[in-house]
Image (cartoon, helix red, strand yellow):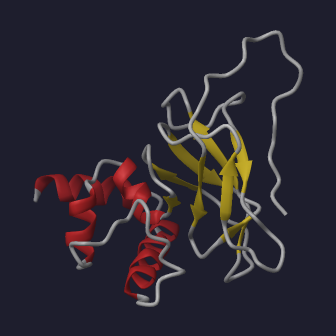
């Protein structure tokens, strides 16, 4: 079941037209997470921006779809439940424009690292596409293990992203 939040009655002009967009939120799959299309680019997920919710229930696949699309804007996922652990997800995951995956690794990219830097730092294959590869669905679990390792570091140290990105900029 896909839940989509729509805006209420308003005198405002209709939103800009977007290309269809769908994807998956991964920190383990996130069930019932709110995904916001960051149309104003401020990284906050403001009221009035297009919003979708990830699939929940037994499947808990983390999949979401924006009926009006969102491909040219960044994405922000928050809330919901980790399908693997059953724990509430606190924090935010982000992905740059064009991504179909929102994960701790795409969050590093929004924080300032390039895809190549994330891949090199984690020792992943140079051909890995972090923006479009669902780490849970992959047969090779290396990407998933690295994604979950970064997720654990972020949970244990709120300043981890800021420090790691600053450190990578120096090297």
Residue at x 53%, y 81% (from the top left corner): 137
Residue at x 39%, y 48% (from the top left corner): 110
Image position of 102 with respect to 30: above or below: above
Residue at x 50%, y 31% (from the top left corner): 42
Q: Nearer the viewer, residue 164 or 43?
A: 43
Image position of 94 with respect to 62: above or below: above
Q: Is residue 128 left or right of residue 17?
A: left
Q: Nearer the viewer, residue 150 or 53?
A: 53
Q: Nearer the viewer, residue 149 or 15?
A: 15
Dividing the picture into quarters, in which one does residue 105 lie?
A: bottom left
Q: Is residue 61 left or right of residue 119?
A: right
Which quarter of the rendering shows the N terminus? bottom right
Position of residue 3 measured from the top left corner of the image (x, y, whole percent)? 83, 53
Q: Is residue 104 left or right of residue 123?
A: right
Position of residue 143 measured from the top left corner of the image (x, y, whole percent)? 39, 80
Dividing the picture into quarters, in which one does residue 56 lie?
A: bottom right
Which quarter of the rendering shows the C terminus? bottom left
Position of residue 44 measured from the top left corner of the image (x, y, whole percent)? 57, 37
- Most extreme residue toward the left is 171
Residue at x 84%, y 15% (from the top left corner): 10
Position of residue 101 measured from the top left corner of the image (x, y, whole percent)? 50, 61
Image position of 63 with respect to 148: above or below: above
Q: What number of labels is visible?
A: 0
């Amino acid at each position: 079941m896909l839940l989509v939040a729509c805006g209420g009655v308003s005198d405002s002009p209709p939103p800009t037209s977007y290309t269809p967009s769908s994807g998956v939120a991964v920190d383990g799959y996130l069930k019932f997470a709110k995904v916001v299309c960051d149309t104003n680019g401020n990284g906050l997920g403001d009221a009035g921006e297009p919003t979708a919710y990830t699939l929940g229930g037994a499947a808990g696949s983390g999949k979401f779809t924006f009926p009006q699309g969102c491909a040219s804007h960044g994405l922000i996922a928050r809330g919901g439940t980790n399908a693997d652990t059953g724990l509430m997800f606190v924090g935010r995951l982000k992905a740059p424009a064009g991504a179909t995956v929102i994960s701790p690794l795409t969050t590093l990219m929004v924080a300032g690292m390039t895809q190549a830097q994330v891949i090199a730092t984690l020792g992943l294959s140079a051909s890995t596409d972090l923006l479009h590869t669902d780490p849970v669905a992959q047969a090779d679990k290396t990407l998933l293990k690295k994604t979950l390792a970064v997720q654990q570091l972020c949970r244990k140290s709120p300043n981890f992203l800021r420090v790691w990105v600053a450190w990578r900029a120096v090297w």
